[in-house]
């Protein structure tokens, strides 16, 4: 049996992280790509409506969030099943430099993200619930 991105054990494919399907042929993240809209609640900026694009990341286990925190910047996350982590990273929105870290998960057509943004020594916690 050809398991592509996995190994065969007793006639069944055991897929590598980030892959699924009968022959481990599908990238797990692909089913989550798209445009999500909903509400973002932040401790300083308050509540706003956002539209976030979830796109392919730089490798098979990563995704990119475009417009999270209502900025046009890209924030990278690492997938593990339907969950993901946003490792600490420095990002830019125009002339503003900020750090972001967080985690979240996908559930059906819903995306939930909890993250913290630090800018100029000030910290802000945000929670986002989006649907596509």
Image (tube, grey):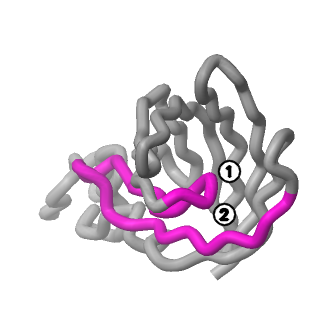
Residue 78 can be seen in this image: no
Q: Residues within 10 Å of mark 1 (few under 14, many from 20)?
A: many
Kind of element beneath mark 2: strand
Kind of element beneath mark 1: strand
Q: Would residue 61 be counted in the magenta stretch?
A: yes
Q: Position of residue 75 (x, y in %)?
A: 44, 48
Q: Would residue 66 be counted in the magenta stretch?
A: yes
Residue visible at 54% across and 44% down? Answer: 84
Residue 60 can be seen in this image: yes
Q: Position of residue 13 (x, y in %)?
A: 30, 56
Magenta residues span 47-71
Q: Quadrant of residue 17?
A: top left
Q: Residues within 10 Å of mark 2 (few under 14, many from 20)?
A: many
Disc number for residue 111: 2
Q: Is residue 60 above or below residue 1?
A: above
Reading the image, the residue beneath label 1 is 113
* Distance between the alpha carbons at the discs numbered 1 and 2: 7 Å
Residue visible at 47% across and 77% down? Answer: 34
Do the CB atoms of the residues marked 1 and 2 lie less than 8 Å apart?
A: yes
Residue visible at 28% across and 62% down? Answer: 24
Residue visible at 67% across and 39% down? Answer: 115
Magenta stretch: dominant secondary structure: strand
Quarter of the image that includes the C terminus: bottom right
32 left or right, relative to 25: right
Q: Position of residue 7 (x, y in %)?
A: 22, 47
Disc number for residue 76: none
89 left or right, relative to 122: left
Q: Position of residue 116 (x, y in %)?
A: 67, 33
Quarter of the image that includes the N terminus: bottom left
């Amino acid at each position: 049996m050809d398991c592509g991105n996995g190994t065969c054990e007793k006639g069944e494919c055991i897929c590598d992280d980030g892959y699924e399907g009968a022959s481990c042929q599908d990238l797990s993240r692909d089913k989550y790509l798209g445009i999500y809209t909903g509400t973002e609640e932040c401790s300083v900026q308050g509540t706003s409506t956002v539209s976030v694009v979830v796109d392919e990341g730089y490798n098979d286990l990563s995704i990119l969030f475009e417009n999270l925190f209502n900025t046009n910047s890209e924030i990278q996350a690492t997938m593990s099943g339907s969950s993901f982590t946003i490792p600490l990273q420095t990002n830019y929105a125009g002339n503003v430099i900020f750090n972001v870290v967080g985690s979240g998960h996908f559930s059906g057509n819903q995306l939930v993200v909890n993250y913290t943004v630090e800018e100029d020594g000030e910290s802000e916690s945000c929670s986002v619930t989006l649907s596509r």
